[in-house]
Image: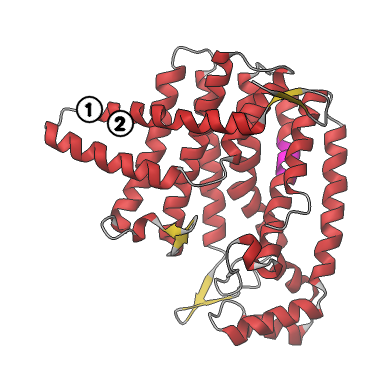
Amino acid sequence: MATLVNSGGGTTSNDAATKEEFVSLFDRLKSDLLSDLSCLPIAQDVKQELEKYYERALTYNVLGGKMTRGLTVIKSAECSLSRLLTASERHDAMVLGWGIEIMQAFFLTADDVMDQSHTRRGAPCWFRVPDVTAANAINDSLAMEAFIYRLLRKYFSSSPKYVKYVDLFLSMTYKTIVGQHLDTNAQQRREGELCLDQSRFTMDRYVAIVRHKTAYYSFYMPCALGMIVGGIEDDAAFQKTEDICMELGQYFQIQDDFLDCYGDPEVIGKVGTDIQENKCSWLVCQALQRADESQRQILIENYGRDDLSAVAKIKTLYKTLKLEDVYAAYEEEAKVKIDNLIASVESASLQSLFKFLLSKIYKRNK
């Protein structure tokens, strides 16, 4: 397999070849999960119905994303070992990577029902597929969570690292659920309509939401899994990784919030709706910190309303408060802070991992 020298001086596998190999493993893992169903004490025709349904559910919900989380497990393992992986190590990293991808599908399937979303990755949300329904989608999200542990048991139950893998998946699921609760319950209703709650739209709550709902499972988890594959056991190394990944995840979500308002829909692939959906976003938290009483009234009267004129008033207020400039300053401060944290990491190979992750998101426009 072709190799590349990365910015940190380590050697990693060719990204395109790695992604192709990663994708090719999915059908094998899917077959493993479906074969588990055949062991259930159920009549053959009912088993076939189950297998057909879950084959479709897995394909529809797990595939279609960028697979960044899963691929990062492989890169993290390589950086942890400062070499290319053996065939066995590579397989382990890919199985764990697909575990995160299934975890992502589990979260998103449930999240779409909660938010009553319409599309996901350019297709109807799973619960909106005509013969699925919300009731099935909720159960399917639980099934996908269970599938993760079926894979871990099949491939790692005899490994001394098994408990660490299971514990990490359980811990990250718990933290993400907490983040989802904080996000959902930041939104209040007045007379049945969504409304801005100034006591809840704070930066303290915002940071808690983004770190628990995004940073842990999207950044820390794939790095930590790769480090376990690579044999790293030093608690200080995991703590340093967590510190860096919390900053990376927070920066990533703040970018998302900014692009939701200011990004080009042709580039980001969607029209932003955070204002209409009353999201506890970075922009509205910053606005509340800077607004005078009359400007706060504009926010209270218009934020969370699915009305184009109300959205326009909020965007005009953001412009008045110069939030684009505030974001530009934040972005540079975040970059410096993350760079300094990376520089404090002793391992040059792990430094290269974090530099790679930062390079993927710094000044992104989609």
Q: Main secondary structure of the magenta part?
A: helix
Specify few, some or many for label 1: CA neighbours under 10 Å numbering under 14, 14-19, or 20 or more: some
Instruction: Please name the residue shown 86% across and 53% down the image.
Output: 333
Q: Residue furthest front?
A: 2
Tell me the tag on residue 34: 2
Q: Which mark is residue 209?
A: none
Return the x and y of residue 125 as percentages of the image width and height: 41, 58
Left/right placement of residue 130 relative to residue 237 reads left
Is disc 2 placed on a helix, strand or loop?
A: helix
Q: Are marks 1 and 2 in contact (CB under 8 Å)?
A: yes
Q: Position of residue 185 (x, y in %)?
A: 53, 62
Q: Is residue 245 above or below residue 263?
A: above
Q: Which residues are magenta?
A: 242-247
Q: Secondary structure at mark 1?
A: helix
Q: Determine the residue positioned at 86% across, 60% down.
A: 329
- For label 1, the residue is 38
In this rendering, position of residue 180 left or right of residue 337: left
**Identity of the amino acid at label 1?**
Ser
Q: Residues within 10 Å of mark 2 (few under 14, many from 20)?
A: many
